[in-house]
Image (cartoon, rainbow, N blue to C red):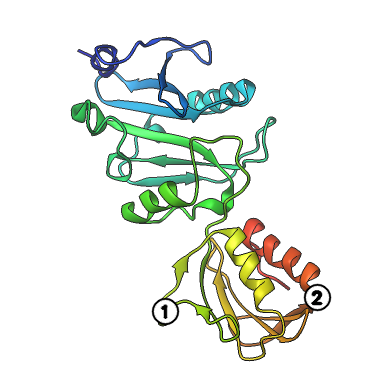
Amino acid sequence: MTLIDKLTNIYEIHNSGAATGWYEYLVETPKFRFHHFIYESVIGENLVLVSIRDEFNGSFATEFIEYLASCDRSFLVCDSIRKDSILSFAETKMNASVFLGPRYHTSFKAEAPDVHIKTTVCFPIYNCEFKGDEPSNEIMLLRRDFVSTVNWNRDPSPKIRFRFDNPKTKAGTIGKKFGLIKLDVVENEIKNLSGVEDGFMDIFNFNDFYIKICSPNKNYYVIYNKSDESIFSGDIRLSLNVIKRFLIDGDMIS
């Protein structure tokens, strides 16, 4: 019995028009509809799963699956995490993809554990959302709380590690450790930092580039690099634009 056959006993699976050899099925919950595309790369050996929630761009789904179909079959078999970041899609600004082995996802784990251990989960991403070398517990945290990888209509959710202290608002992180944070929270805390002379914010982007942000005067910010050299200064609007490019594009500020 193939892996597809085992899933047919659970889901209503049918041939997909997205690419030759691919199948699809639909799962509806009270809140969402999930479209799943599956491919058995080597019969009985490995399954590839692509999942999309709610309304989605059908042309992009086909484009992404055609990209997977063009990959070498061995490339689709993944034990841990693999990132392909040299991509360009016609239908979206997403520019990378991630492949997750069974230790990095829970798909089919409850209903078909023997299929789960042979399943690679694939999805398109913005390059800034994953570095590509995260441990399994961090990947599950990122997908649960920061990046909805089944929502293909999302805006970029860059991976950000930060720590900060704002004596004025009495807000800040505890200790010297860096934590993961969402972009909108970073933007809000940068605004709150305005004019707080003894406050600061330390940030690493997904490429592990580091900056420190201070605001010695109201509506005026200074950004430093790891060598404590000033690399940018400006008002809140210019500063936010520079910091967002740093977080989303991944390049160091110069």
Q: Circle 2: is it few (<14), some (14-19), or many (20+) Cα within 10 Å? A: some
* Position of residue 18 in the picture relative to residue 108 (left or right): right
165 up-or-down from 147: above or below: below
**Amino acid marked by disc 2:** Asp
Label 1 sits on a secondary structure element that is loop
Which of 191/98 is in front?
191
Residue 192: % across, % down = 65, 75
Q: CA distance from mark 2 to mark 1?
A: 28 Å
The quarter in which the C terminus is drawn is bottom right
Q: Residue at x 38, y 53 (%)?
A: 141
Residue 160: % across, % down = 53, 63
The quarter in which the N terminus is drawn is top left
Which image quadrant for residue 252?
bottom right
Q: Circle 1: is it few (<14), some (14-19), or many (20+) Cα within 10 Å? A: few
Q: Which numbered disc covers residue 202?
A: none
Q: Residue at x 42, y 40 (%)?
A: 99
Q: Earlier in the sequence, mark 2 or mark 1?
A: 1
Please give the residue where the numbered disc 2 appears in the rendered image: 235
45 up-or-down from 237: above or below: above
Marker count (numbered): 2
Which image quadrant for residue 229?
bottom right
**Amino acid marked by disc 1:** Ile
Which of 207/211 is in front?
211
* Position of residue 60 in the picture relative to residue 173 (left or right): right
Residue 83: % across, % down = 47, 46
Please give the residue where the numbered disc 1 appears in the rendered image: 174
Report the residue that reaches farthest toward the top: 14
Q: Residue at x 58, y 25 (%)?
A: 55
Q: Residue at x 61, y 40 (%)?
A: 87
113 up-or-down from 236: above or below: above
Which image quadrant for residue 210?
bottom right
